[in-house]
Amino acid sequence: MLKSSEVCQILELVRSYSVPIRDDRVRGLITWYVKALQNAIDMIWDNIEWRYCFPELVRRGGKLTTVIGWKVRIPIIPKDRVFKKRLREELMKDNPYAAHWIDAVIRKAYSIMENWRKKYLRGKARKVKPRIRRRFARCKITLMKIDYQAKTIRITLRPGEYLTISWRSTWFEHRVRGWTVGEVIIKDDRVVIPFKSSEEIYVRRVIGWDSNEPSLDGYEPSIGFIHVDLKPLQSMKIVYERKKAIAQSRGKRELYEKYVRRERNREKDFINKLSAGLRLLFPNSIHVFEDLDKEDLVSRKRAKNRRKRNARTPWKRIHRRISEVALTAYVDPRNTSRECPRCGYVVETQEGHVFECPRCGLKLNRHKVASINIRRRYLEEKRRRKRRARMRGFPHSNEPEETMKEELWVGVTPSGRSPVIWIPMKWDPEGDETKGRGLDQRYQAQ
């Protein structure tokens, strides 16, 4: 029997695996595809219409405010049927392959231009035409015939000419049993196959996460506070920063690139273990994060040391990877660590690691305050949207609940079992976590 508070949500899962391939026809296909894709982008770029963007008056909180965009002139990408027909006819002139490859090229070109336009309007891209620098070919689903019994994909190159790929007897075959195949990406030496599936999750927990330099700090009433240690990731990146600096000062480019690859692989391994551990440790949960803007965190408005520390922690990659294996949501990050979760008072300035409310006297670590507010903000937005049961957050009393007197410490080791669980620490508003309370019985079995 499911509780009335449990809500079923669908989690879309995607796993991509590569299969090595050796075929002389592949290199010719990719060469033509990249050239046709760049030609399509050139034509779309030449037909962009630039319009002026004027400030808008928007009512927020009962007041009229002026909204001014990043750019004075905004690009309008041509999408009318006449232009698309002319674009297709122009690309078909030098097309030695099936006609559906032209449709795949046009769709990819529009996707690239739309991504550039979004970044440009947010001030994160220049007024420069996108250039294709990587060799690849994205195959349209209409060019593929998938045999799930034989575990093969037949890709049409030309009418009557095919390229066959098989994932039978591969190391990942058992992982994707029962999954569907998406649009494959062809490269010179391999084919990347995306497998898709969906999973029904009955949500029982909502965990608010505050993203910090050395840790992820979460809160959920039935668990208490959660502390995920990111110091091993920070230490690894500091070590490789020094190694790369030495290799760069000595002019050893190959050694520098080797360190870059190692750092990237170890970071990816750490994040994969972390996301898998959180999924295993907190099933049937929604993980709520702040919608952080990494560009602002590493801008030159901040001190150099601060920028370097912010750049070391890949919050966006951690959030994105967790979203691939668990349900996630995002909230506005403003004032999450300066708003009192008990009375709602917003402190003008916040210094140090301890939050102290001048109105109600609440004294608590500011990372824990932020995690409570992030969770509460998500539930408030959900209540406003769906008008459901009242939110549950920090107890409105002078003393915290018993569940909030515990803190679960979780970490990832470079080698070994994941997740690693430390002793939950005794709750202390000052952050003096020195007295252990013994491992919680709910997590001993894991």
Image: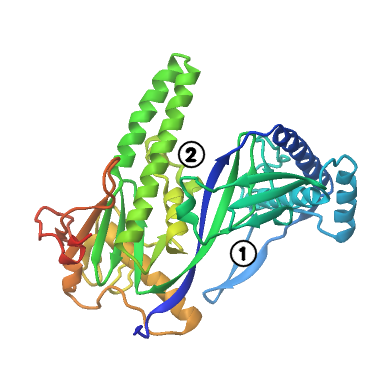
Give the quadrant of residue 270.
top left
Residue 62 placement (x, y as % from top left) = 54, 77
Residue 438 placement (x, y as % from top left) = 10, 60
Locate the N terminus by quadrant.
bottom left
Secondary structure beneath label 2: loop
Q: Residue at x 38, y 79 (%)?
A: 6
Residue 190 placement (x, y as % from top left) = 60, 38
**What's the residue type where badge 1 is placed?**
Thr
Q: Which mark is residue 300?
A: 2
Query: In screen coordinates, is 216 left or right of 93?
Result: left
The earlier-in-sequence mark between 2 and 1 is 1
Residue with the mark numbered 1: 66
Q: Residue at x 74, y 38 (%)?
A: 29
Residue 438 lies, with reference to residue 130, above or below; the image says: below
**What's the residue type where badge 2 is placed?**
Arg
Q: Which mark is residue 132?
A: none
Give the quadrant of residue 84.
bottom right
Callout 2 touching callout 1 (CB < 8 Å): no
